[in-house]
């Protein structure tokens, strides 16, 4: 037993997760810039090489990683990834989400050709499908639903790995689909819709107030656009809430598991904490936390001693040793700081399994380096 | 570090004479590059003796207050978060689109009652979420209001306003208000409000700073953001390279260690320890060689570059003040040319 006061969290066993055939969906979430996409791709590759038939849905991979995965062309269709080891009978397909195209396909699938055309060119729809902050999350969910159905029907995949959008907050991923469906299915639209159906049906003070205010602020044309949008969209409103509910149920089912990705930094761990606590509150299946870019050293020399040694050396003859010792001192301080943050994170979450991925000196851009990340993910240390 | 900071502070000039009159500093950067830290540090750098500076966040992450170890900001309040070592005040504001819309309706149209009725119908949520570009107009509109107080000579005016803006991937769209509302309002008050915000964002008093790490994706996104902002005619100020590690050795020496061929002879270390240290240094050497290459790429963007040193101790209020000193020195030098 070491002298560390804090309880050590359980270790997240990634290989056991991969080997568990009941797990059909792995959702990778976390704050922006923590390496979600890389973690998703590395997990998918490792699972494929362990024999699973995997499809990975990436959202916004770095260009060179996208090229390595063969998803540099945005075509919204899973494609086989080249260069994987098929010895264990697994396979890996990858795709990059095209948010607008996925939304367009939903519209086309749920409306007649005429109304689809008027929806697709309406300015509210254009904004909703390309700019609305929650659309990417919603469409990632939509695509996940489609892939899941396809997996069940065709048997092409037994594991779907989903990367989540670079949201302002990790929680957006859970909240956005509900938010979007409540917007499209809400009371406000019902009021406007009633107005759109005919001038005599609605004489409520509320609506006149609403319409009056909107006209005053936005000018008349806009309200017409909005009503056109709503009228045309009406046919698929009900579907939205239903689909959001279905997706939520899929996420909460035992065949799904969540991996929360963080880095040992304050912001990223705060987001991870929000997410972990939220998943616990909602009874969602959490596999554990992946902490990326953790620094380590195998040299048992304190920062103080390294600096003292550097101080005693002659800068004219030992410049490299001095630089190396100072670098080590900095590294030890970084490690201490990271450990402090990680200990605090786990202090109240001792049952949340954790795994760490050592910081790599260079970017992960090819299958070989993804394989290394996968090995680090699974390394039970 | 503290000795260097004290020395630097002793001969510092008052900022007001050395910086041009830039009243709005927009800070963007890829997620994870530290743009919130840099936003707050820049606010501290601008908050010299007697000056009041406001730092605004628009994405509800509560990152600003967290740096000062405080609870999240209450809506629409602008409390003082810090008194800087040089005697200025840094205030914080979390801008919320729905609050901004309510405030806007009340102050321009005295529509308080109607607005509340609208809110009950979910109209505020709808308008700020779906109406094309409206959300960004409202968020930047609140920033515009805070900046404009100075010209109006109001008591609650600020000498400078810092906006901790959305990440580089969305920054051009976020600031390109004119484009955003074109589908929304062709005439009317929203349009004229958008035009005023537009003019403010393109004035020489507004600059956008881009925070990056010396890593692949952040540097690429910085370049893309510069290109996109060029098209909008919004001025890019300084590219701020964050978490830069100092390293006195040449590329040649570093490459030797990166390749695993470097040897060390630290007195008191046995051979095994020297080998472990050499291997550890090799990782840092690899990273440094990469970083130096990307640092040169940043120079190619044709914008002034400021460097913020990596702080192995992590970021707290004192670390923010240290970064503020570095920004002040470098962004000052940039103006003297």
Image (spheres, rainbow, N blue to C red):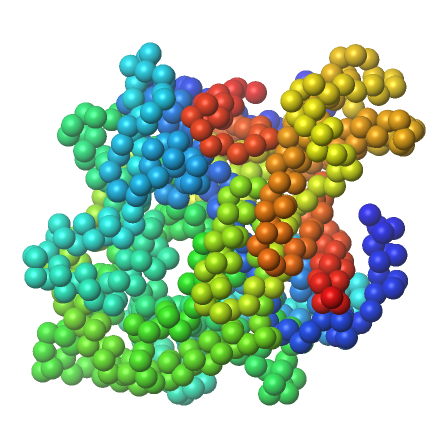
Image coordinates of residue A79 in percent, x first then y, are: 27, 32
**Residue B271: quarter of image:** top right
Q: Can you see residue A179?
A: no
Which quadrant does the C terminus of chain A fall into? top right
> Could you tell whether A8 is left or right of A221 in the image?
right
From what the image shows, is residue A113 above or below residue A308?
Answer: below
From what the image shows, is residue A157 above or below residue B302?
Answer: above
Image coordinates of residue A265 in percent, x first then y, are: 60, 42
**Residue A344: quarter of image:** top right
> Could you tell whether B119 is left or right of B257 in the image?
left
Q: For the image shown, how many numbered marks are present on the structure?
A: 0
In terms of depth relative to the viewer, which is nearer, B275 or A272? B275
From what the image shows, is residue B182 above or below residue B73?
Answer: below
Residue at the spot x=25%, y=67% of the render? A123
Image coordinates of residue B183 in percent, x first then y, are: 30, 72
From what the image shows, is residue B42 above or below residue A98?
Answer: below
Image coordinates of residue B11 in percent, x first then y, are: 87, 64
In terms of depth relative to the viewer, which is nearer, B249 or B21? B249
Residue at the spot x=32%, y=54% of the render? A135
In terms of depth relative to the viewer, which is nearer, A175 or B331? B331
Q: Can you see residue B110?
A: yes
Residue at the spot x=65%, y=35% of the render? B289
Residue at the spot x=74%, y=56% of the render? B326
> Could you tell whether B222 is left or right of B261 in the image?
left
Which quadrant does the N terminus of chain A fall into? top right
């Amino acid at each position: 037993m070491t002298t560390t006061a804090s309880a050590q969290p359980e270790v997240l066993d990634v290989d056991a997760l991969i080997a568990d055939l009941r797990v059909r969906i792995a959702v990778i979430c976390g704050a922006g810039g923590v390496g979600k996409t890389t973690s998703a791709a590395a997990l998918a590759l490792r699972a494929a090489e362990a024999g699973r038939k995997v499809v990975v849905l990436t959202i916004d991979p770095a260009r060179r990683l996208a090229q390595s995965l063969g998803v540099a062309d945005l075509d919204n269709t899973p494609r086989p990834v080249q260069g994987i080891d098929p010895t264990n009978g697994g396979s890996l397909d990858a795709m990059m989400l095209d948010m607008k195209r996925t939304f367009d396909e939903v519209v086309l699938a749920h409306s007649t050709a005429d109304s689809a055309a008027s929806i697709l060119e309406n300015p509210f729809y254009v904004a909703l499908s390309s700019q609305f902050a929650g659309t990417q999350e919603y469409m990632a969910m939509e695509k996940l639903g489609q892939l899941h159905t396809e997996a069940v029907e065709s048997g092409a995949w037994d594991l779907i790995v989903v990367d989540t959008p670079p949201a302002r907050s990790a929680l957006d991923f859970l909240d956005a689909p509900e938010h979007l469906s409540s917007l499209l299915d809400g009371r406000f639209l019902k009021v406007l819709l009633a107005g759109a159906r005919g001038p005599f049906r609605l004489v409520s003070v509320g609506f006149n107030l609403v319409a009056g205010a909107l006209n005053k602020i936005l000018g008349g044309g806009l309200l017409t656009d909005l009503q056109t949008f709503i009228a045309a969209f009406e046919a698929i409103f009900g579907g939205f809430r239903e689909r959001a509910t279905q997706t939520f149920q899929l996420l909460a089912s035992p065949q799904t598991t969540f991996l929360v990705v963080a880095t040992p930094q304050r912001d990223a761990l705060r987001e991870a904490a929000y997410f972990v606590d939220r998943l616990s509150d909602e009874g969602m299946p959490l596999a554990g936390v992946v902490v990326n870019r953790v620094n380590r050293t195998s040299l048992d020399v304190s920062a103080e001693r390294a600096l003292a040694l550097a101080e005693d050396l002659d800068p004219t003859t030992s410049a490299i040793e001095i630089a190396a010792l100072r670098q080590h001192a900095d590294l030890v301080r970084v490690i201490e700081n990271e450990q402090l943050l990680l200990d605090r994170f786990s202090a109240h979450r001792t049952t949340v399994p954790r795994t760490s991925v050592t910081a790599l000196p260079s970017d992960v851009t090819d299958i070989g380096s993804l394989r290394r990340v996968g090995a680090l993910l699974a390394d039970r240390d | 570090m503290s000795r260097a900071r004290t020395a630097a502070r002793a001969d510092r000039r008052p900022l007001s004479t050395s910086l041009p009159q830039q009243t709005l500093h927009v800070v963007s950067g890829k997620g994870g590059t530290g743009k919130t830290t840099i936003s707050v540090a820049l606010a501290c750098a601008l908050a010299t003796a007697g000056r009041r500076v406001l730092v605004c966040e628009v994405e509800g992450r509560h990152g600003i207050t967290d740096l000062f170890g405080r609870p999240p900001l209450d809506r629409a309040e602008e409390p003082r978060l810090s008194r800087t070592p040089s005697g200025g005040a840094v205030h914080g504001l979390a801008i919320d689109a729905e609050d901004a819309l309510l405030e806007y309706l009340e102050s321009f149209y005295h529509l308080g009652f109607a607005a509340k009725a609208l809110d009950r119908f979910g109209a505020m949520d709808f308008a700020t979420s779906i109406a094309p570009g409206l959300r960004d107009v409202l968020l930047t509109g609140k920033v515009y209001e805070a900046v404009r107080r100075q010209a109006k000579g109001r008591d609650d005016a600020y000498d400078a306003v810092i906006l901790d803006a959305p990440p580089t991937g969305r920054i051009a769209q976020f600031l390109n208000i004119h484009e955003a509302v074109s589908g929304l309002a062709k005439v009317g008050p929203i349009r004229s409000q958008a035009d005023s915000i537009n003019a403010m964002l393109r004035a020489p008093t507004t600059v956008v700073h881009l925070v990056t790490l010396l890593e692949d994706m952040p540097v690429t996104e910085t370049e893309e953001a510069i290109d996109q902002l060029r098209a909008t005619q919004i001025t890019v100020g300084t590219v701020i390279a964050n978490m830069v590690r100092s390293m006195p050795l040449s590329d040649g020496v570093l490459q030797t260690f990166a390749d695993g061929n470097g040897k060390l002879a630290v007195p008191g270390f046995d051979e095994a320890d020297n080998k472990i240290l050499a291997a550890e240094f090799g990782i840092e050497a690899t990273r440094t060689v990469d970083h130096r290459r990307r640092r040169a790429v940043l120079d190619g963007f044709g914008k002034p570059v400021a460097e913020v040193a990596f702080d192995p101790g992590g970021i707290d209020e004192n670390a923010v003040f240290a970064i503020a000193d570095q920004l002040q020195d470098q962004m000052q030098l940039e103006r003297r040319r």
